Image (cartoon, rainbow, N blue to C red):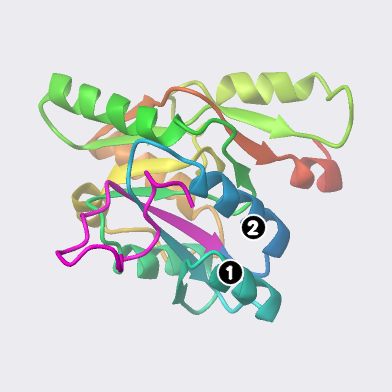
Amino acid sequence: MNPNTSHTSTDVTHSGPTPKPDLTVIIPALNEPHTLEALLGDLGAQTGLRLDILVADGGSDTTTINILKKHDIRRIKSPPGRGRQMNRAAQKARGTMLLFLHADSRITRPDLLAEAMAQYRKVEAQRGFDRLAGHFPLRFATRQQPPHPAYRFYERKTTLNRPQVINGDQGMLISRRFFYELGMFDASLPFMEDQKMAAHIFERGEWITLPGHLHTSARRFEEEGL
């Protein structure tokens, strides 16, 4: 574990209270052992901030649960449903800032989250309000080499702050206060809860593009077609 990153709420080397985390990372999961372990390794390598990492688990098998124990990650049990899972984990967050990440995300730079937080705070100070949400541009991890040219088009779209182009796989950095003000995710939806939340943010606040790139699996495109 990186010394600049805290995953748990206790530290046996300190007699005083544990420092408050700078950011709570919430990852919805349901039987994602391989992708989840890779992402947890990436989060453990992050520097420059203290993380509170929660996996919002919708009923995974023992393989996934054992990975969480291995990495000493808090598991928040929930009935399945991505919106429902993320809402329940948000209620257990220790940080005042939340970052929702999909389990098949990858973070290739150890300073990515610290820079994202710095950019958020900078824009927050400039605007004078915290009704903000940040998303990362994407890079697709593909099995096909070279990748189909369409991926470059999709990646370019993820740099934009426009309605109907921001999805959960780009990550969502948001203050806990604003997230609650928006009513959290619509747990009645089996999917598309991320796009509904994105629309609410456009209506009542502002989206910003965060520095760097979040890498994501292209498996759905490869299995179902572009």
Judge whether 18 appears above or below 142 on screen.
below
Q: Is residue 93 left or right of residue 181?
A: right
The crowd level at tag 1 (other Cα within 10 Å; few <14, some 14-19, many 20+) is few
Among the 4 quarters of the image, the one containing residue 183: bottom left
Q: Give the number of the mark in front: 2 or 1.
A: 1
Q: Are marks 2 and 1 in contact (CB under 8 Å)?
A: yes
Residue 137: percent from left, percent from top:
53, 27
Q: Secondary structure at mark 1?
A: helix
The numbered dot on residue 214 is none
Residue beneath disc 2: 37
Residue 92 vertical placement versus 135 (above, below) = below
Q: Which residues are magenta?
A: 1-28
Q: Is residue 123 above or below residue 103?
A: above
- Compare residues 69 and 194 and report the one nearer the observer: 69
State the residue at coordinates (37%, 27%): 115
Verify whether residue 11 appears in magenta: yes
Q: Residue furthest right?
A: 145
Q: How far is disc 2 from disc 1 in space, using C-alphas?
A: 9 Å
Residue at 57% across, 38% down: 107
In this figure, what is the number of numbered marks?
A: 2
Residue at image location 33% in from the left, 41% down from the top: 49
* Residue at mark 1: 70
Can residue 188 be seen in the rendering of this structure?
no
**Per the image, is 50 magenta?**
no
Of helix, strand and loop, which mostly describes the magenta segment?
loop
- Decide which of tag 2 and tag 1 comes sooner along the chain: 2
x then y, percent, for residue 1: 49, 52
Q: Residue 211, located in which quarter of the rendered image?
A: top left
